[in-house]
Image (tube, grey):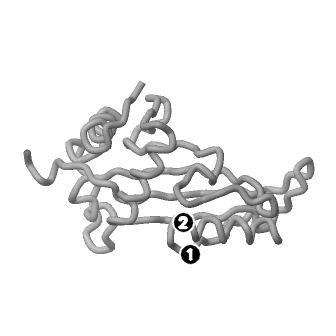
Amino acid sequence: MNPMRELYVDKVVVHMGVGEGGDKLSKGIDLMRQITGNAPVRSNAKKTNPTFGIRKGAPISCKVTLRGKKAGEFLETALKIIEKRVSPGQFDRQGNFSFGIEEHTDFPGMSYDPQIGIYGMDINVVLARRGIRVTRRHIEQRKLPKKQQVTPDDSMMFLKSRYNVEVR
């Protein structure tokens, strides 16, 4: 097979929405650091929502972006937690997919602590082919040719072959 047509995991973004700042968010950040091994970044609310007590600009969540070998290892662990099942509705038009994990205690080495509580997280996976730099560079930036773009079918085949994921 042509090496330029092979898919790879470009990045994995792990997002944990806590809903409020302060102590709850700092506990979420510590958990995220333990689970991923990277330092999380705080995310702020985009809109004010008085029913949930959220102000625009207030820190309410954290996220970590994993790339390279770490991204692949984390994805393998996360897919085991969801029993390696993904539905076709979780894929977007660019071949990226997302899934959620309800409890952080499902990760190996994590246990329930009543002082911390239970946190869930969203995992977004971006798949790409070699040559994507053409669209990201500053000088002579170009569109990616249609045959180099990742489709949902390509992503599903990649998950089945690389990670033995059942797409149903």
What kind of residue is marked 1? Ala
Image coords of residue 151 (percent x, y) = 32, 38
Residue drawn 55% across and 60% down? Answer: 109
Residue drawn 50% across and 71% down? Answer: 37
Q: Quadrant of the C terminus?
A: top left
Residue 88 lies in what quarter of the image? top left
Image coords of residue 5 (percent x, y) = 17, 48
Residue 58 to residue 47: above or below = below
Residue drawn 77% across and 56% down? Answer: 117
Q: Quadrant of the N terminus?
A: top left
**Numbered disc 1: secondary structure:** loop
**Is residue 55 left or right of 30 when viewed as pictured?**
right
Q: CA distance from mark 1 to mark 2?
A: 7 Å
**Numbered disc 2: secondary structure:** strand
**Residue under pointer 2:** 64
* Marking on residue 63: none
**Residue under pointer 1:** 39
**Is residue 37 left or right of 59 when viewed as pictured?**
left
The front one of 86 and 53 is 86
Mark nearer the N terminus (1 vs 2): 1
Q: Is residue 151 visible in this depiction of the protein?
A: no
- Mark 2 residue crowding within 10 angstroms, few (<14) / some (14–19) / many (20+): many
What kind of residue is marked 2? Val
Residue extending farthest to the left is 1
Image coords of residue 111 (percent x, y) = 65, 57
